[in-house]
Amino acid sequence: MLNAGSFFALSDFPHTEIFPTEEYVWTGLNLLKEYMDSFSYPTFYTGLIKEGVPLRETVILYEEELLDSTHFEIVYGDTTKGKLAVFKNGEQLAGATVIMAGTVLLGRQIKLGQGVLIESGAMIKSPAIIGDQTEVRQGAYLRGYCLTGRSCVLGHTTEVKHSIFLNRAKAGHFAYLGDSILGENANLGAGTKFANLRFLDGNITVRTKDGFIDTGRRKFGAILGDNTQTGCNSVTSPGTLIGKDSFLLPNTTARSGYHSPRSIIR
């Protein structure tokens, strides 16, 4: 059965309830809106952040309080490895998150975990839940209903909407993800695009060896299992499911449907 357990190891994912055990893996996408709308978000807007307005100065989020960064030292180490560090008077503020000048936050349903870095020029539309030690790079565009686990990368000029990143999933450069799920340690090469809408009307179906399955979804991008990688400038057709430990080679378009674990798609 094409359930979440056949694509992902979920034991360490903070939001496992979004993947019912016996349902198809894309059920996570069906439940995403309800799950995120009902989530309890912190209220951290102050004079330091104005909704929809680029930040004039870098701010620190520490223990759900926003702080002016003027008198802090920030060490911009590897965020995903916990190397982002914030100090005040020589003392480290463990778990402090850094929101750089030029960031735009739109809407109030935004949750930023500990040790997160939001780089200049990123736009985050609510709702968004960004897990601990995740890096949102310059120019990233999060269009709403974006949910990440720990130590993820939402990269430079990458556009994400209505999608889920499991722990350590990375879309580092020039990617598009709509209505999609990245498994743990999945990695997208630069320029990877997940097409999520067919030219023809109707629901997207998934091709399997036993026939076609109606997903009930008009928009459905791709699901990549744990440790699956894509090469640069690769594309997936709407309704593409790629099993664990697979490769989509550079400049290749993956045919819609189910691709078994350890596939090499040329």
Image (tube, rainbow, N blue to C red):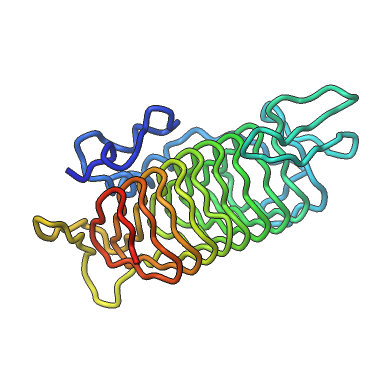
Quadrant into which the C terminus falls: bottom left
| Residue 137 location (% of width, % of height) | 65, 53
Foreground residue, 86 or 263?
263
Quadrant into which the N terminus falls: top left
Residue sitting farthest toward the top: 91
| Residue 114 location (% of width, % of height) | 63, 32
10 with respect to 62 (left or right) = left
109 with respect to 18 (left or right) = right
| Residue 199 location (% of width, % of height) | 29, 77
* Residue at image point 19% right, 36% down: 22
* Residue at image point 21% right, 40% down: 23
Foreground residue, 30 or 181?
181
Foreground residue, 255 or 57?
255
| Residue 97 location (% of width, % of height) | 69, 36
* Residue at image point 33% right, 69% down: 197
Residue sitting farthest toward the left: 210
